[in-house]
Amino acid sequence: MTLAPQLRRELSRMEEARRQTQRQLDLIDRQITRRMAALIPGLLPRRCVYRRGRAPDPHAFLATYRAELAALAVERQPEIDALSRKLARQEQAIARFVECHGKAAAMDERR
């Protein structure tokens, strides 16, 4: 058995682990987006008609939306941070692997 297939297998395994971590981060992002979409009807002003001639504050909705989004993000922040650190470590490991073994794999493939 040559060295190149083993190296390619190892690199493939590392890249799959990185993709899985990225999928988990994307899943958290989609979950937060879904929860915010479900909350929007409750954040909208209750009346369409101006009360006593006063228009609704257009910035109130955005301020409430941003506050709710920040609360949801803070709730999941430890998980997001842990996955982000893991993803960074995996990317560094892949880069080091390619840097160290890239030439060996290329030379072994030529034989």
Image (cartoon, rainbow, N blue to C red):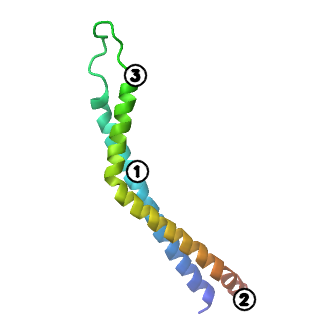
Give the class, few, some or many, for how many residues have Cα within 10 Å of label 2's Cα (few <14, many ≥20): few
72 displayed left or right of 13:
left
Hey, which quadrant is residue 64 in on the image? top left
Mark 2 element type:
loop
Q: Amino acid at mark 3?
A: Pro
The residue that label 1 is drawn on is 29
Q: Residue at x 35, y 38 (%)?
A: 67
Tell me if residue 24 can be seen: no
Question: Which three-letter amino acid code belongs to the residue tagged 1?
Answer: Asp
Q: Secondary structure at mark 3?
A: helix
Name the residue located 50 percent from the left edge and 70 percent from the top edge.
Answer: 89
Indicate which disc, 2 or 1, sits on the residue closer to the N terminus: 1
Q: Would you say residue 63 is visible in this rendering? A: yes
Please give the label number shown on residue 111: 2
Front tag of 1 and 3: 3
First in sequence, mark 1 or 3: give its number. Answer: 1
Of the 4 image quadrants, the one containing the C terminus is bottom right
